Image: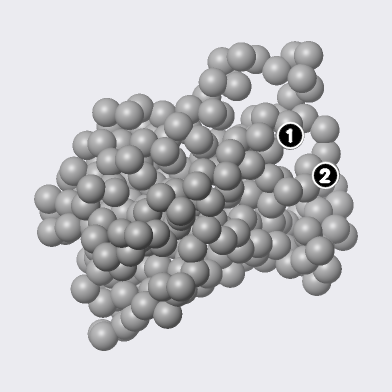
Amino acid sequence: MTTVDGGPLAGRRALVTGGSRGIGAEIVRRLAFDGAAVAFTYGSSVADADRVVVDVSRGGGRVLPIRADSSDAGQIASAVDETVTRLGGLDILVNNAGVAYLAPVESFPLEQFDRLVGVNVRGAFVAIQCAVPHLGDGGRIINIGSINADRVPTAGLSVYAMTKAAVAGMTRGLARELGPRGITVNNVQPGPIATDMNPAEGEFADVSRQMTAVGRYGNTADVAGVVSYLAGPNAGYITGATWNVDGGFTA
């Protein structure tokens, strides 16, 4: 994927949390392809981060990997500061970092409950809190939620679904709060998307596929394309909205 000179995001600076694999990595690639300079955070795998850097750099894009734990407020703040310093500012924040854990309510470990809330909700809030002072008119905040905020098709998902419903609510509230400052806030909710952690094969995948209207899994590029559009110049009147990228899973 080669960066487009004069693309729709040319001159824009972006930070993507959790950008070293899966949907996050594809978002980094797409924003860079569309002309943005992109910083991204990663948790522990330097090899995964390096692969994204190589992909973007080969295409002529500008990319900055930052190691940061999305459950640690101090590390999130440092990642935002490093992005602003190294890229010269910040125009787009994509909150993609997230974790999942499935278990019945009576045996759900409280440490996992705290982890899911800490990364999926608190981590996203802290990233926004740190980024907002740097976002000017035309700034974009895009949260990556989940269709499980609206539909919970299997047992054990209650806590994960709760955290993603919180992200959707936070999106609407912040759209009201930040709208007068020219900053849009939107929520993208992927459905069954094929990644290494969510393969489009196996027994559970067959059930998910049958629940979509199109009868198949989506791919990471489907999500990244929507994110890039919401980050771009033609989406300035879209805010407080949730976009389901789910092949009709919630239809």
Q: Quadrant of the C terminus?
A: bottom right
4 in relation to 28, above or below? below
Name the disc covering residue 173, or none.
none
Q: Is residue 76 left or right of residue 230?
A: left
Name the residue that disc number 1 marks.
Answer: 157
251 in relation to 118, above or below? below
| Mark 1–mark 2 CB contact (< 8 Å) | yes
Q: Helix or strand or loop: what does disc 1 sit on?
A: loop
Q: What's the amino acid at mark 1?
A: Leu
250 in relation to 173, above or below? below
Q: Is residue 134 visible?
A: yes
Name the residue that disc number 2 marks.
Answer: 153
x, y percentage for residue 218? 67, 65
Q: Is residue 71 left or right of residue 38?
A: right
Q: Considering depth in this image, is 184 or 246 the residue closer to the camera?
A: 184
Residue shown at 70% from the left, 18% from the top? 108
